[in-house]
């Protein structure tokens, strides 16, 4: 399952995005 909801400008190379990270989304990655 691949979820593409992140704005690349908000992401660093680790895939952790934005100032507030949803733990469920982190688990998907």
Image: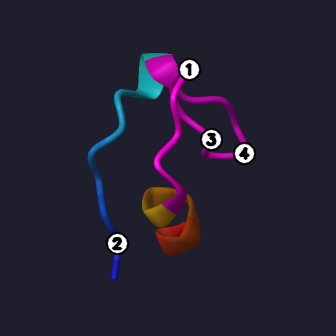
- Residue 15 x/y as whole percent: 61, 46
Q: CA distance from mark 4 to mark 3?
A: 6 Å
- Residue 21 x/y as whole percent: 53, 39
Name the mark on residue 16.
3
Could you say whether the residue bearing mark 1 is in a helix, strand or loop? loop
Relative to 14, 29 lies left or right: left
Categorize mark 1 by other alpha carbons within 10 Å: few (<14), some (14-19), many (20+): few
- Image depth: mark 4 or mark 1 in front: 1
- Residue 16 x/y as whole percent: 62, 41
Q: Please, which residue is most extreme toward the right here?
A: 14
Could you say whether the residue bearing mark 3 is in a helix, strand or loop? loop
Q: Please give the residue where the numbered disc 1 appears in the rendered image.
A: 19
Q: Please, which residue is most extreme toward the bottom here?
A: 1
The first of marks 4 and 1 along the sequence is: 4
Name the mark on residue 2.
2
Of the 4 image quadrants, the one containing the C terminus is bottom right
Could you say whether the residue bearing mark 2 is in a helix, strand or loop? loop
Tell me, yes or no, whether the two marked residues, 4 and 3, touch with CB atoms within 8 Å: yes
Categorize mark 4 by other alpha carbons within 10 Å: few (<14), some (14-19), many (20+): few
Q: CA distance from mark 2 to mark 4?
A: 15 Å
Categorize mark 3 by other alpha carbons within 10 Å: few (<14), some (14-19), many (20+): some
- Residue 2 x/y as whole percent: 34, 72
Q: Please give the residue where the numbered disc 4 appears in the rendered image.
A: 14
On screen, residue 25 above or below 13? below
């Amino acid at each position: 399952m691949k979820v593409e909801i992140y704005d690349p400008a908000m992401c660093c190379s680790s895939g952790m995005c934005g100032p507030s990270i949803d733990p469920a989304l982190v688990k998907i990655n």
